[in-house]
Image (cartoon, helix red, strand yellow):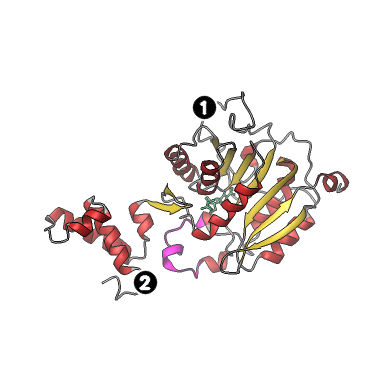
Amino acid sequence: MLGRLGFDSAALDAKRLTSFALGLSDLEIATREGEAVDEAGAQRVVELLQRRLTGESVARIVGEREFYGLAFGLNAATLEPRPETEMLVDLAIAALPGGGRLLDLGTGTGAIAIAVLVNRPDATALATDLSAEALAAASGNAARHGVEDKIAFLQGSWFEPVGASPHPNPPLKGEGTPSSLGQSSGLNVEPKPLPLEGRGWGGGKPQPDTDLFDLIISNPPYITSAVVETLAPEVRDFDPRLALDGGPDGLAPYRIIAAEAARYLSPGGRVLVEIGYDQGAAVTALFVAAGFGNVAVHRDLAGLDRVISAHHINGITRTAR
Ligand SMILES: C[S@@+](CC[C@H](N)C(=O)[O-])C[C@H]1O[C@@H](n2cnc3c(N)ncnc32)[C@H](O)[C@@H]1O
């Protein structure tokens, strides 16, 4: 049925949904093929297959998706982390100095920051998202992967919850701060106070109001508002719009990140942002205009522009204003 309706992965999808509905492992499904299924079990299988037929992905139905070899819990407010974003994790792991502090903007499931921390136990992270519901999933994922003591989650728009930034670095260049997208309730999803001791070298979590970051990463929404409407139903109808829509030209979040990042970076720190395949030149221009150095476009395995890296060059910071 799924195959006839054009789902490429029909057989695999049906197997995964059947095992999930019946609470069986893939091995059990394979070895107990001849057994009868009771009526309640059969009904559960049918219900899940019907959801799949509406375009809902298998990952959403089972409530989790694998990313960087780790399973991430999803909810209605989280984007499903995509394989192409794993490149950002590779670059972040390589870019972070020992004991480095990471800021992940628009963390969603927390996939990027958590995958980095699992692979870099010396690092610590702060992660923000406008959606409290997404942060609830991220917080659960951090605990699931044993990094909850290394990461703090804050709700709000981009840098806003990170603090007023008493940091010595002004924005590198430009006419000031673009207004943030959306509204923040200011709710700190993790209300317990952050530990003050043992900062750096894998110690306590970064402190929102005082710490500079060695690396800022983001996979922001970057699809133009008009194109969001034309996406495949599996994405358009099930991934949250807040995670997709980058404004009229798809660049709104990059304008904020490029303009503000220097305030939060330690000298020599870096920014890594995922981009759409056709945004390399435009996003490069934003970081160059903001005074960053060594701005480079990284291509993915398909040869498409995928990530922009930019260095906070201290000398430029000082002369830019
Ligand atoms: C493309 S998704 C990326 C999610 C996750 N980092 C990943 O790579 O799978 C963009 C994320 O940005 C969040 N977001 C959208 N607008 C935001 C804003 N103004 N401030 C902070 N986060 C925002 C969305 O809720 C969503 O989680």
What is the three-letter code of the residue carrying label 1? Lys
Give how far across and how far down residue 293 sits, in percent: 78, 53
Query: Which residues, given as a range, are shown in magenta?
Result: 229-242
Q: Which residue is mark 1?
A: 192
Q: Is residue 41 left or right of residue 186?
A: left
Residue located at (53% from left, 55% from top): 86
Question: Can you see residue 242?
Answer: yes
| 213 drawn magenta | no
Residue 53 vertical placement versus 308 (above, below): below
Question: Can you see residue 219?
Answer: no
Give how far across and how far down residue 9 sits, in percent: 35, 68
| 233 drawn magenta | yes
Mark 2, secondary structure of its residue: loop
Tally of numbered tags: 2
What is the three-letter code of the residue carrying label 2? Asp
Q: Is residue 206 left or right of residue 284?
A: left
Name the disc covering residue 208, or none: none
Q: Nearer the viewer, residue 121 or 141?
A: 121
Q: Which residue is mark 2?
A: 8
Q: Is residue 297 left or right of residue 114?
A: right
Give how far across and how far down residue 55 sits, in percent: 36, 65
Q: Nearer the viewer, residue 247 or 162?
A: 162
Quadrant including the N terminus: bottom left
